[in-house]
Amino acid sequence: MRASTVQFVWREPRSTASFHSAVSLHGHTMHSEECLNFLPRYLHLAPVVSQIVSRYQRAPHNVDFARAWWTPPLSPASALSLEQKQIARLGLRPLVSLTDHDDIRAGLSLGVATDSPISVEWTVPYRSSIFHLGIHNLPPESAASWMQTLAAYTAAPEEGALPAILHELARIPGPLIVLNHPFWLEEGVLEQDHPPALARILHECLAWLHAFELNGTRPWMENSKTMELARSHDRPVISGGDRHACEPNACINLTNARDFAEFAGQVREGHSTVLFMPQYREPLAQRMLAAGRDILAPYPEYPGRERWPDRIFYRGADGVARSLTQVCSGRIPRLLAGAVSAVQFFGGARFRPALRLFFQPGAEQSL
């Protein structure tokens, strides 16, 4: 892995001493659309909630979850501030790259005054699988044009065109191209289809992939596989928090770079120091429950998006996307509201010590 280093703040409390800056990569904002087609598979595992979901999947409700999506609660400015504060508490200068799904509005809205790059998490259908590439630090003058190119591929993928797109991107001095969570399966992708697609995309496109991501919301077993993959392909590993709610990224990069462009240059040369933060050791199920509470919480500071039904959308048979507030005419069904209340109640901080007893420890707790 060239000069890659992976550290854990609970093991090495002085790991930041020789660095001046830290980088937070792969955080989402209100501009990401998060599809809900995965939801029934998980909710059917929960008693009572399973019956509620089944009811909405049957006629006359006939809810197609593939047509539904939610948006993370935080605005770009709030997400930037959240990540900056975590890094500042370490006594380091924060550099933050926000990467919404197939959308660059976060970076565009923050502007050059915040030192925030224009970045995106690009959805890349390939073979029988789907990959996600972190494209960081697009040139401001051509970012919109590049986004059109990337979106066109996502909408109508031509595998033969992917190497050419990445080649042109990599020719630009500033961008950093990261293979995000390489072993994660997009909903609907068969487990047996992903490994050959991964092997093929690495064979065709490795020359333009600068780093592989260690993900702050994926289990350590998966991140360990990513480290082995990076080692076998002579690529550095890089952090990616993948934050969707209000917990700051669980892993960051340490650097002495003065700005993001300089940091990107270091990674392209193979140098990366990843630091896992204390929250990564918390049980993943508990962290997801807390994230669910954040996602469903009210945010009066965001007019038009104050309540969780304002941030969940459904595309009807007429092709029009409407918020759940509009679909339900402002009256959320009692059963659905009850399930949301349960998540908000048990996802609170007061229940975390008790819930740790119910969650099976993972490899993260033994690091």
Image (spheres, grey):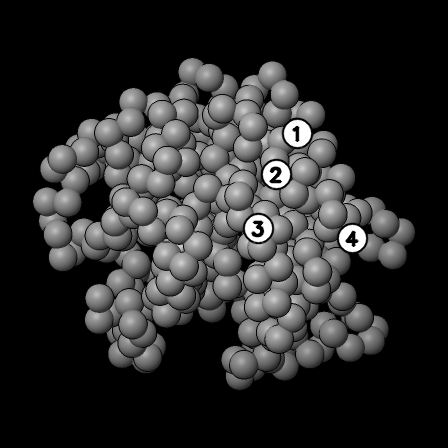
The span from disc 3 to disc 4 (Cα, nearest Å) is 24 Å
The span from disc 2 to disc 1 (Cα, nearest Å) is 11 Å
Dot placed on the residue nearer the N-terminal end, 2 or 3: 3
Q: Secondary structure at mark 4?
A: strand
Report the residue marked by disc 1: 146
Where is residue 262, by image quadrant? top left
Residue 203 sits above or below residue 63 on the image:
above
Report the residue marked by disc 2: 166
How many numbered badges does the structure rendering display? 4
Viewer-side label of 4, 2: 2
Q: Secondary structure at mark 3?
A: strand
Q: Is residue 203 left or right of residue 363?
A: right
Dot placed on the residue nearer the N-terminal end, 3 or 4: 3
Asked whether the beta carbons under mark 4 and mark 2 sit within 8 Å of each other, the answer is: no
How far across and how far down the image is residue 5, in percent? 25, 49
Q: Nearer the viewer, residue 362 or 335?
A: 362
The span from disc 3 to disc 1 (Cα, nearest Å) is 16 Å
Report the residue marked by disc 4: 315
Residue drawn where x is 32% and y is 68% of the image: 283
Residue drawn where x is 76% and y is 67% of the image: 63
